[in-house]
Amino acid sequence: MMKKIGFLMVLFMFLVAFPNDSFAAAVDTKVILDGTELVQPENTKAEIIDKKVMIPIRIVSESLGYDVLWDKQAQTVTISKEGTLIEMTVGQKAAKINTAAIEIDAPPVIKKGTTLVPLRFVGEQMNLKVGWNNTTKTVTLTSPIPEVVIDEGETDPVIPPSSGTGGTIIDGAIPSGVSTVSAISFNDNRLIVTTSGKVGPKIFAMKAPDRLVIDLPNSAFAPSFGDGQALNGSQMGELVITDSSDVTKVRYSLFTREPSAIRIVLDLRQATSYQLVSDDSGLYVVDLNVDGDVGGPPIVPPISSDGKKIVVIDPGHGGVEPGKVALTGLQEKIINLKLSLKVEQLLKQVSAINVVMTRKDDTTLSLSNRAKLANALNADLFVSLHANGYTTTTASGTETYYARDSSIPLAKTIHRYLVEATGLRDRGVKYGNYHVIRETTMPAVLLETGFMSNASDLAVITNETVEMRMAKGIVEGIKEYLGIK
């Protein structure tokens, strides 16, 4: 009898340590493209089939700008973009790239109406770096850093020499007196640039095609810049913009080395007005959400809100700063961003509110720059979203922090809705000496939705239904505090 029990225990341990494919397929998987989690079909997600990682082809293709067609009768999926045509047929290892026939390592399959294809094939044909984390069941897809050439033509004005001490970059060394750019982002139709000191930006518009050029004299990229944003060996990079009615792309480059200067170019859909906002501490905002003469001179703050309330939503951590990490490998920065994007989506439906995000992707952004952005915008309130953690697995619950007495009413209002949404233990509203809520000048709160170190809390705050409930609760709290129906 004891031998039989011993054998069953060994068998159990073996099954846990070496799960079969059907077990792996049952685990909730994620697909991360360039730092952003893609929304997979509810009933069919990436999974392991016959020891091959298979992913839904449509969500990846369409996120990269490919057109996807499905021939139900022929069971063939066709993917096309800029002269490239990829054809695959369910159950067949033979595929076509334009007119060339190739063999893929596993045939496409159909699961509940969704076509799954091998991860390796996607990487090879779409020029993506692919990865699979078997612990967290996460697929990572990374686009190559583009070789960006910023050449705006002979008619471009030359960057004027700075009146400061200036300097020339030699072998990558940044001379004294040169300000460094630590981050460039584009959120809510606003270009946000953070520097180590004043740079005196020069802004001008150009046509054929329409674009807006921002020159930063006497400046260079900070050594840490490339850690959180695309920057190739030639000191060039770009951001592809998909959610702006005015901008398609943001390009940036170390434009001159003698004297050192950075040029940023906004590729526009059409000529547009703009205004420059600066808080004199090294944060610059070029705001395109303005009316006026196209190409008119920059305006000094505050940003016009047309009577609307400006709400800044801050997804905690990001980029090289993951925040807390659960035993499952899930990083706090991902949880914070997912919830924040849901809050943003709901706030955009409130006509009396202008919402601004400190980040909308996996970007590195310092605590001081988050606070500077809110202050430069003269925001009406600031909400930073986080998930908690502790050294033991027993700590549980939802809590809200404030740093100044003027923020207490906001903290109490949002906290009431948030606790109801999570259903977790109410840990109360507390004082916290956190930079982002201490250095902001408007009512500001930091929300800790639940404990990542507690498996039960983690399951709650990462549940899609609860996430939306929390987002709705936070928005209702904001509306109540601002007196908006």
Image (tube, rainbow, N blue to C red):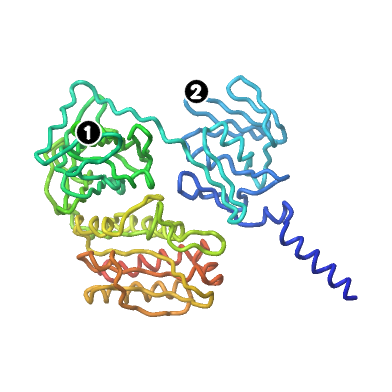
Is the C terminus in the top left, top right, bottom left or bottom right quadrant?
A: bottom left
Q: Check disc 2 and report the residue beneath it.
A: 83
Q: Residue furthest right?
A: 1
The answer to whether residue 53 is left or right of residue 343 is: right
Identify the mark nearer the N-term, 1 or 2. 2
State which mark lies toward you, 1 or 2.
2
Q: Amino acid at mark 2?
A: Gly
Give SS at disc 1.
loop
In terms of depth relative to the viewer, which is nearer, 350 or 83? Answer: 83
Say which quarter of the image contains residue 91: top right
Q: Nearer the viewer, residue 71 or 325?
A: 325
Q: Residue visible at 56% across and 70% down? A: 455
Give residue 205's position: percent from left, percent from top: 18, 32
Tell me if label 1 and label 2 are in contact, CB under 8 Å.
Answer: no
Amino acid type, residue under disc 1 in the picture: Ala
Q: Position of residue 242 (x, y in %)?
A: 38, 41
Crowd tier of the residue under label 1, counting other residues whose Cα lies within 10 Å: few below 14, some 14–19, many 20 or above = some
Q: Which residue is mark 1?
A: 271
**Closer-to-camera residue (278/187):** 278
Q: Quadrant of residue 86?
A: top right
Residue at 49 percent of width and 41 percent of height: 142
Residue that appears at 16% across and 31% down: 159
Q: Quadrant of residue 309?
A: bottom left
**Is label 2 in a helix, a strand or a loop?**
loop
Q: Residue 414 location, x and y as percent?
A: 34, 72
- Classify the position of the N terminus by image quarter: bottom right
Badge 2: residue crowd in 10 Å (few <14, some 14–19, many ≥20): few
Pick the front one: 51 or 267:
51
